[in-house]
Amino acid sequence: MRRLRKVFAGAYGDRVPGAPLSPMLATAGALPSGSEWSYEFKWDGVRVLALFSGGPPDLFARSGAVVTAAYPEISDMYLPPGTLLDGEMVVLDRLGRPSFTFLAERMHVRERQRAARLAVQHPVTYMIFDLLYYEGNDFTGLPYLARREKLEELGLTGPHWTVPPSFGDGAATEAAARENHLEGVLAKRSDSVYLPGRRSPDWIKHKFDRTGDYVIGGWRSGARKLGGLLIGVPTPDGLAFRGRVGGGISGAAEKELLGVLEPLASRESPFAPGAVPREDAKGAKWVRPELVVEVRYGNKTPDGRLRFPRFVRLRDDKTAQDSVEEDDDGR
């Protein structure tokens, strides 16, 4: 396994600390059509790489953090040493739909006894969608359909893991995803290779709701202690202001956010000079721009502010540098 890690490290200068490599990322966009595309359901979970070295797999989050202890259900999975899988960890509700609320209770747990209890209450399913290495052989340079064929040949169907289907009809895939209240559809060029650490137009994520990842630059009190988050996107001059987010913050989310925001208190605003209007800056408590949140919104005003924004979740798996603003193109 040391040799395999050296292979990864030597092949990719963009590997993340602790993980074999950094996962390939999709570009947001309208759903493409044509025979050159393949389609998968988009699952509302967290990205996880599974590395096998002769026993239970080592699991890595997109950030490179080791998350093996959080998901004890996956410890029964076995593949030959030198195998690396890419997929999404989800928790399915009683209707078989992904529930990020239930997953959020599990994804940061590192204490084994607590993880075992939660595994009974809210078991995960590992949705495996790519085979990157097998028995030490590098498959990342193979076309998507070839990797997909080899992945399906492995017969990876277990109590807590599966290979979800891939389709050739984008419109039908979208209709099925909407009917089942899924997050969206992923379109992948059938001949695309796997590009570690790259956000590529060869993979397109088509979300049914407009969402984005934004950096918290400050917060304000209101009827509650945490009345709203002041969010933005990084620029060379500081954060560009994208508005104030107060909706969707539950009592539990408020407690979690305050717990991570208060230690980041700063005397200076991280926003670009003049970016935050006076009425929004009034009473603001500034923080170092290190935390990322996912926000759901209707559309944007001409000056870039989000309309009808609602807090979705804290993105512990992303850094401020990962907060890349994408166009509103119907995703």
Image (tube, rainbow, N blue to C red):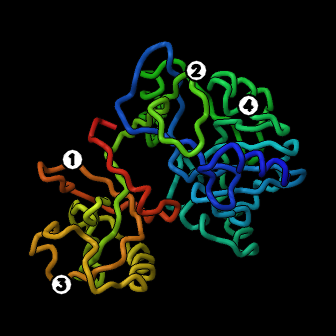
**Which structural element holds mark 1?**
loop
Could you tell me how far apart the alpha carbons at marks 4 and 1 are, in whole angstroms? 39 Å
Of pointers 3 and 2, the one earlier in the residue sequence:
2
- The image shows residue 225, relative to residue 17, as above or below, that is below
Q: Earlier in the sequence, mark 4 or mark 1?
A: 4
Q: Which residue is mark 1?
A: 299
Residue at figure coordinates x 82%, y 49% from the top left: 52
The foreground one among 144 and 107 is 144
Q: Are marks 4 and 2 in contact (CB under 8 Å)?
A: no
Residue at 85% across, 38% down: 135
Closer to the camera: disc 4 or disc 2?
2
Three-letter amino acid code of the residue under disc 2: Asp
Describe the element under mark 3 as helix, strand or loop: loop
CA gap, disc 3 and disc 1: 27 Å
How busy is the neighbourhood of tag 1: few (under 14 within 10 Å), some, or many (20 plus)? some
Q: Position of residue 13 (x, y in %)?
A: 62, 49
Q: Earlier in the sequence, mark 3 or mark 1?
A: 3
What is the x, y in percent for residue 124? Answer: 66, 54
**Residue 191, which numbered label?**
2
Pinpoint residue 227: horizontal percent, then vertical percent. Answer: 25, 77
Which mark is nearer the camera, 3 or 1? 3
Q: Which mark is residue 283?
A: 3
Say few, some or many: other residues with alpha carbon within 10 Å of mark 2 (under 14 / 14 to 19 / 20 or more): some
Q: Amino acid at mark 3?
A: Gly
Q: Which label is found at residue 151?
A: 4
